Image (cartoon, rainbow, N blue to C red):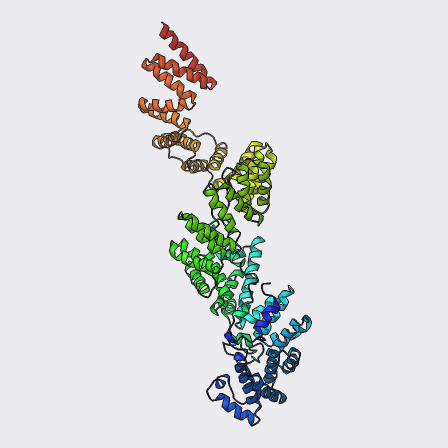
Amino acid sequence: MEFMGDRATLLETGRFVRRHAGNVADATISADAADNVDSSGSGASADSVETAGAEARHRRAADGGDTASMSVLGALLLRRGDLDGAESYLRAATAEGDRAAANNLGVLLHQRGYADEAAGWWRIAAVAGSAAAAHALGRHFRERGDEPAAEYWLRQSAEQGHALGAYALADLLEHRSDAGAERWLRAAAEQGHREAAYRLARALERRAAEEARAGGDVGLVMGRAGRGAGAGRAAVAGPAASGRVGRGDGGKAASGRAGRGDASAAVADGVGVAGPAVAERTGNDVSSAGAEAGRTGSAGSQGGAGSQGSASSADAAAADGPQLSVLDEAAQWYQQAAARGHRRAALHLGAILEKRGELKEAGRWYLTSAKDGEARAACALGFLLRDAGDEESAAVWWLRAAQDGDGNAANALGALHAARGEQQTAERWYRAAMDAGDVNGAYNLGLLCAAQDRTPQAEQWYRRAAYAGHREAANALAVLLLQAGDATGAEPWFSKAAEAGSVDAAFNLGILHVGRDDDRTALRWYERAAAAGHTEAALQVGIALLREGDEQAAERHLRCAAGGGSAEAAFRLATVLDSRQPPPGPPALGEAMAEKSECEEWYERAAEQGHRRAQVRVGMLAAVRGDMTDAARWYREAAEAGSRNGAFNLGLLLAREGNEREAALWWARAARAGHGRAALRLALLAARRGELTEGQRWCARAVELGPAEVSERAARLREALHQELTA
């Protein structure tokens, strides 16, 4: 529950005079006037109370004994703060049975500190049918700790259609984790209560998230899955740090979000108990709890028993259109609350719209919320602007949010300055983030120091963040310790990070155990990292399964790794698929060229990523198809990247085309890299040219390199060349 009932109660019911936000009687006057109209039939209205001569007119009527005028005049004086003047008129009207006067007399007495006497008058008014008095009485009992009595009176108020009564009842029930709370939040929201609309939306959004986590598809209505792999922006959980064991400073600064995948959930992290949102509400909302806000029906009074207004947009959509998803309904309630000035609702609505890809609308609501002082919205707006390429405007909003204490925005500013090479300014903002309570500030300081080779300081900041529970900092700290040769000290931090959910740490633990020849434990950590989507871990699991002969399971992991961008996984997957099909023969004359097989497509994907063996294989497949130009291109790419097989095969193609000079150059490169067949080819070429000594030298190299067949042929050729030389 986001708001403790007692704290919200005092502000909402108007039992404290809040002169700067409108006095308690602001709505009391209009509400009481409306109630007097209904009860007395005198024709007085809230509008007439506000006219210049209203007070004098009501005073004359009250002095003449008119009950309705005494009630209205008492309410007017109460609003002005003239408690002494108001009391006599309210007591007189109450004595004549005016329930609005009894309710307002309770408000007056409560302001003077006579809570028990106030409760007595509220009870009289509530028994007479005043929904606002029942609401005030329910709040009174809740403050006294008498929840059964509080629930009874709040339910009386809520069932009469009193928005604040319904909201207060929902708050009470939610405090007890009663499932009936949502019904009354909805009832209050349908009458325009913005805080109820916001809290109803929050409950619906949480439900959507829970259903999505449980395997449902409710959460998918948010649209895009996000453009990054990291956490949502407001949480700034930090992207994967230090990646591999050999990279101590390879992490990215936790400058906000690595993507947008979880923006709305991240926004929720900052809601907490941030003070009662009812404190933001207008004077009418505040004081209608103490007033008889019953029957005005006006849009300005949210507490009226009869202020039904028109159906909300959410209700209209639910009634007339197709069934809404849970998250769609939450978005509509957020919109209703945001349209009434609720800045956190605007923030959450912006997050949902951003996930749907409606960036323009998301930006509009972020801007609305940010202008109302919501630092997280200013930060989110900054990220939208940055992604749109407007870093300068983004920096303006981040600065505004950071100055309001948003650690996430301070981290974003730090990352921005770090990217510009302004290390001192970056460090200042990271420290500001840390001072704001954002542990990512310490983590980012560690990354900054590591990038500057200030290893002791990096270790200090990583350790500080790790002790605070930052999992990627724990992983980065373990990497530093491992690089320093302290494997014993590194392992507990890797384990702590992995148990906290760091995928990189789980992978690094696998590497650590491989170094100890503990393949079983290593595989367990690799499998854990692979299950969380770690590409390299999936590759390692696939390789291990291939060694064990489980080709089907290996293929599944290799596909995951290859799909994640691993060239090695794509090559190994292609070899698995290639082994299942018969070797292709040369195409028959006039036969149409067959389409590329799946294994060839994987070979090509790996080749395009620079995998040398895949490039050689793609060249071989092209040669089999008769496409020598494509074959030569791939052989050349592999050879230039250092592949001895690529250099040898390129030499064969060039020799076939009659270019023996260039072929010899590539064979020589291959032979020097340890390719026995290339050395034998060079020996044969030298023998044919009559360069017997050179031929003998390459024969000796071929005998040395092998394989056995090549060594045998090279030995015979060397012997023949020797005989020729000695003849």
User: For residue 650, what is the image quadrant?
Assistant: top left
Q: Which of 209 and 669 is in front in this view?
A: 669
Where is 239 relative to 586, above or below?
Answer: below
Where is 462 relative to 51, above or below?
Answer: above
Left or right, 33 with respect to 651, comes to: right
Residue 249 is situated, as x and y percent measured from the top left of the image, at 48, 42
Q: Quadrant of the C terminus?
A: top left
Q: Nearer the viewer, residue 100 or 651?
A: 100
Q: Can residue 679 be seen in this snapshot?
A: yes
User: For residue 493, what is the image quadrant?
Assistant: top right
Residue 158 is situated, as x and y percent measured from the top left of the image, at 60, 74
Residue 648 is situated, as x and y percent measured from the top left of the image, at 39, 25
Which residue is the extreme one toward the bottom? 64
Where is 445 relative to 377, above or below?
Answer: above
Q: Which residue is drawn at 53% across and 91% down?
A: 59
Where is 72 relative to 495, above or below?
Answer: below
Q: Can residue 541 be seen in this snapshot?
A: no
Q: In which quarter of the image is the N terminus?
A: bottom right
Q: Residue at x 44, y 65 (%)?
A: 371
Q: How many labels does the image show?
A: 0
Which residue is the extreme one toward the top? 727
Residue 312 is situated, as x and y percent measured from the top left of the image, at 50, 71
